[in-house]
Image: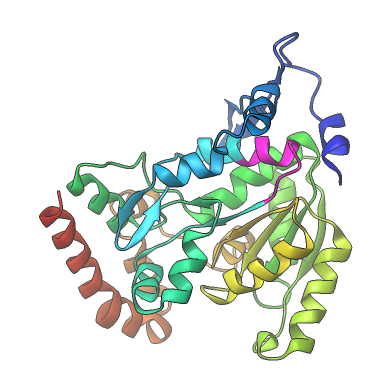
Amino acid sequence: MSAAGRSAVLPASGLAEGSGVRWAGAEVAGRSVPTAGWVSSEAEQGRRAGRPSATARARAARVVVGGVGVDPLSEEEVVGWVARELAAGRGGRIVTPNVDICRAVRRDPGLAELVAGAELVVADGMPLVWGARLKGTPLPGRVTGADLIWSLSGMAARVGWPVYLLGGAPGVAEAAARELGSRWAGLDVCGVDAPPYGFDRTAAGRERVRRKVVAAGPALVFVGLGFPKQDLLIAELRRELPEAWFLGCGAAIGFAAGAVRRAPEWMRRGGLEWAHRLMTEPRRLARRYLVDDLPFAARLLAESVVRR
């Protein structure tokens, strides 16, 4: 959908007259959250005057923790940012690093560049939030793909932007689409896909996935294939769908479908979601969490204290 077409479906209520800005609200977690400036004459004037873009300004303000630059944004601010950019016809990528992603980025400069090049990078892991606080550069809080899939879908349903779900085992994306649609009336899920394991190893496999996404013409694409597979695919798709926004969301599609049980709220708040996942999938996650991630998280926190 073109930027002009998207602007046409903005809700009529809540628009400010004569301000040069369209104002509207996105419902996030059951409450109305303003997403000010979806279409801004001020932003256009800044572009013409050669001032830095909002993305460039945000990158300059990133908090470096665990070797990754993180945008100091709340979940509500991320939703508002994406809404404004979609309405202006500008797409982007959202990366939600956790300890495992930080560890991978530190080992591989190519992955570091991939993450740093995203329009939005927000902290999924609580150790990143703690580390930023210890450095004296606190973040607003944790912003997870598992939460953003719901809040961004709520914004999309309110405005009329189509979404696409890519990832999960066969049938999981369809179940997630039903659950999201039951929460957000009017949500347009324009397509789902569950690529077979190893699809990304061949050009033909990637091309099949790419064709389906491009043909659907989504405004928002939730890609749950795990890092870095999802993010490498998103980088390819961005070239085909420059006006769309992509969220690399890991297990979020499975969480939304109910196929994977998420940790209770108290465990999430306490930074123990990893322990819950370890209990539910010990064979797959034990080495990653206990041998690799825990020591890295300890070093991350120690470095944050030293660098305060």
**Residue 102: x percent and y percent?**
36, 67
Q: Is residue 9 left or right of residue 87?
A: right
Q: Is residue 279 left or right of residue 132?
A: right
The answer to whether residue 30 is above or below residue 34 is: below
Residue 132 left/right relative to 105: left
Give the residue at x 54% y 43%: 55
Foreground residue, 56 or 285? 56
The reply to whether residue 167 is visible in this rendering is: no
261 drawn magenta: no
Q: Does the magenta stretch include residue 87?
A: yes
Asked if one can make out residue 91 in the rendered structure from this viewpoint, the answer is yes
Most distant residue in the top direction = 18
Q: In which quarter of the image is residue 53?
A: top right
Query: In the picture, residue 263 is in which quadrant?
Result: bottom left
Q: Which residue is drawn at 43% across and 78% down?
A: 281
Residues 121 and 248: in front is 121
Q: In this view, does 30 lie above or below 257?
A: above
Task: Identify the residue at image location x=69%, y=70%.
Answer: 236
Percent coordinates x, y for residue 136 in the rendering: 20, 42
The stretch of residues the image draws in magenta is 82-91
x, y percent for residue 243: 75, 50
Q: In this view, does 40 lie above or below 178?
A: above
Quarter of the image for residue 32 reads: top right
Give the residue drawn at x 65%, y 89%. Answer: 198
| Residue that extends furthest to the left in the rendered view of this protein | 306
